[in-house]
């Protein structure tokens, strides 16, 4: 029973400490909201200038290159069978082991 009471007291103390730390942090200032343009002025006169600049800087579409017909590839025959590969790997391992034994 004492363990339970100590555990609950620890949880309560931890929660209180976390809440105290949270309250100490300053709240971030709200982001300023940009002012809306007055409705009676109409469209922005700079819009046409920006559209013209955008049209000038846009890249011209490139013609698509002609694609060559795909050739069917025949499946390549395996260079070596698994048994041959196993034998080659074991031989290289034995050679490396022999070299280590000679050097020591």
Image (cartoon, rainbow, N blue to C red):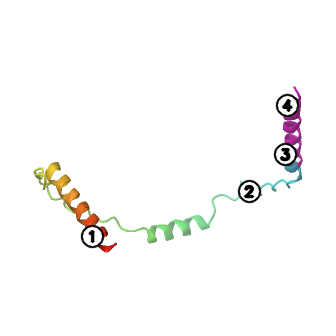
Q: Looking at the image, which residue is at 36% across and 68% down?
A: 60
Position of 63 compared to 44: left or right?
A: left
Which residue ends up furthest to the bottom in the rendered image? 103
Coordinates of residue 4 in the picture (x, y in percent): 85, 29
Q: Earlier in the sequence, mark 3 or mark 2?
A: 3
Coordinates of residue 54 in the picture (x, y in percent): 49, 67
Task: Please name which of the two marks, 4 or 2, marks the residue nearer to the observer.
Answer: 4
Q: Which residue is mark 4?
A: 3
- Determine whether label 1 and label 2 are within 8 Å by CB: no
Q: Earlier in the sequence, mark 3 or mark 4?
A: 4
Q: CA distance from mark 4 to mark 2?
A: 68 Å
Q: Which residue is mark 3?
A: 18
- Determine whether label 1 and label 3 are within 8 Å by CB: no
Task: Please name which of the two marks, 4 or 1, marks the residue nearer to the observer.
Answer: 1
**Label 3 secondary element:** helix
Q: Looking at the image, which residue is at 63% across and 59% down?
A: 43
Q: CA distance from mark 3 to mark 4?
A: 22 Å
In front of the other: 27 or 50? 27
Q: Which mark is residue 99?
A: 1
Q: CA distance from mark 4 to mark 1?
A: 64 Å
- Determine whether label 3 and label 4 are within 8 Å by CB: no
Q: Which residue is mark 2?
A: 38
Q: How many marks?
A: 4
Q: Looking at the image, which residue is at 76% across and 56% down?
A: 31
Q: Earlier in the sequence, mark 4 or mark 2?
A: 4
Q: CA distance from mark 1 to mark 2?
A: 87 Å
- Answer with the quarter of the image where residue 42 lies: bottom right
Q: Earlier in the sequence, mark 1 or mark 3?
A: 3
Q: Which residues are magenta?
A: 1-20
């Amino acid at each position: 029973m004492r363990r339970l009471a100590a555990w609950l007291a620890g949880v309560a103390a931890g929660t209180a400490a976390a809440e105290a730390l949270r309250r100490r942090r300053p709240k971030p200032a709200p982001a300023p909201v940009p002012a809306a343009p007055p409705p009676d002025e109409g469209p922005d006169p700079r819009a046409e200038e920006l559209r013209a600049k955008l049209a000038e800087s846009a890249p011209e579409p490139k013609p698509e290159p002609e694609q060559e017909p795909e050739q069917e590839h025949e499946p390549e025959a395996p260079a070596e069978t698994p048994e041959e590969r196993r034998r080659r790997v074991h031989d290289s391992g034995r050679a490396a082991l022999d070299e280590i034994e000679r050097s020591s």
